[in-house]
Image (tube, grey):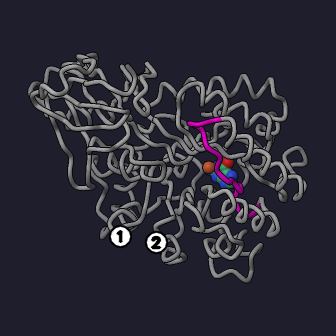
Amino acid sequence: MDGNFVIRGDIFFTPEKNKCEMHPDSYLVVKDSRIVCVEKNLSKKYSSLEKHDCSGKLVIPALSDLHVHASQFAFRGLWMDEELLEWLNSHTFPEEEKFADISYARKAYEIFTRQLVRSPSAHACIFATIHKDSTLLLCRMLEEAGLPCYVGKVNMDRNSTPGLSEKTEDSIRETEEYINEVLSSFSLVKPVVTPRFIPSCSDELCRALGELAVKYDLPVQSHLSENLSEVDWVKELCPDSTSYAASYKERGLWGRTKTVMAHCVHSLSREEELLKDENLFIAHCPDSNTNLVSGIMPARYFLDNGYNIGLGSDIAGGVSISLFDAITDAVRVSKLYHRHVDERFAPLTFKEAFFIASKLGGSFFSKTGSFESGYDADILVLDDSSLETPLEGLTVAERVERYVYLNPKGAPEHKICQGKWLF
Ligand code: GUN
Ligand code: FE
């Protein structure tokens, strides 16, 4: 039965940034869709639970994607020779216009949902487009697929293409309608207030969205200090603000409810004190930051100084929906930062990046991403037997690292979200 079971396998998780637990050939006990314990020898009291024998396979926590644009999945891997603002205007906005057509949205979101199901992520914080009806369709698909996600109808009332602009009052009204429809129709999928970024949203719109977040106690997601030309533009748009982060705060869009800001590549020494807030999460999107020539986010600084950070795929700035790729990209770019920017910032280790992608980023959503008692049963089973090697005697942690780096094509062997076996 969903929600109550035992999995036997080689178990791995990272309860702290510098600590991983390995339990070869052990049992993971789940009751009422929550983790109970990991045992080497299964206690009698659990013997009536349904047993899934995954001996020889890796059992790890499912991950959390803190920043992804479902509407951009269609054009992953295209138009990768431009920086952010040019890429938005010449490709991204015209593509997002297509979601006014519900039949196009259906096709595109079916593909996205299918691929997200097959990915290592149990949770995702998702941007759709400005279009209410197609965003509701995406919510329905994710709910039916069994994925606990936050989904935002995007708000944009300035500096966009004519086909992707809202009137301020329509944007506010439709957002409130959207919020009410999602809250009344779905249980796994939740709404998130989604001003695209300061250049796309007038002051009046920002203020109204901040009030909606407080009124319905909803999280806010947006972009912050991603690319230098964007940072300069925000300075022009908000000459009285001391920083980009301050421009959100002054408009009521900062930390009044849980808030996730993607990127923060250029936040250090500009605005980092505002990010040190228990309600603030940073979505680190290393593949996107490389592709759009945004730079390297100093993840080591934020991790060591107690900030809330998670990883994001940022499709289609990033090309891979798999957070396994985000983990290895985060490690790689942290090495470049160490060598080329500041030697005082040590590279991230694999285990630290895994911790960010699982438990730390997951804390935006719920108690997920760990196998400590009381955590949600968000679980992946991985079969590494097809990754041929003559090496013997690898530890469970080494096998997880190798699997994540090699990231074989195809879905995990099994994926369980909040106690429900998706496959
Ligand atoms: N900033 C504003 N919109 C976007 C977007 O769609 N992608 C990225 N990477 N940054 C943005
Ligand atoms: Fe983004």
Callout 1 touching callout 2 (CB < 8 Å):
yes
- Residue 409 is inside the magenta segment: no
Residue nearest the observer in this picture, 348 or 292: 348
Q: Is residue 257 left or right of residue 104?
A: left
Give the residue type that dot 1 points to: Asn
Residue 83 appears anywhere in the view = no
Residue marked by disc 1: 305
Residue marked by disc 2: 276
Residue 195 pos. (x, y %): 71, 57
User: Could you classify mark 1 by the number of other residues whose Cα lies within 10 Å: few (under 14), some (14-19), or many (20 or more)?
Assistant: few
Q: Is mark 1 within 8 Å of ligand 2?
A: no
Residue 365 appears anywhere in the view = yes
- Which stretch did the figure color magenta? 186-199
Residue 110 pos. (x, y %): 65, 23
Residue 62 pos. (x, y %): 38, 36
- Quadrant containing the C terminus in the rendered view: top left
Residue at disc 1, secondary structure? loop
Q: Is mark 2 within 8 Å of ligand 2?
A: no
Q: Quarter-wise, where is residue 56 in the image?
A: top left
Q: Earlier in the sequence, mark 1 or mark 2?
A: 2
Give the residue type that dot 2 points to: Lys
The Cα–Cα distance between marks 1 and 2, rounded to whole angstroms, is 9 Å
User: Could you classify mark 2 by the number of other residues whose Cα lies within 10 Å: few (under 14), some (14-19), or many (20 or more)?
Assistant: some
Residue 132, disc:
none
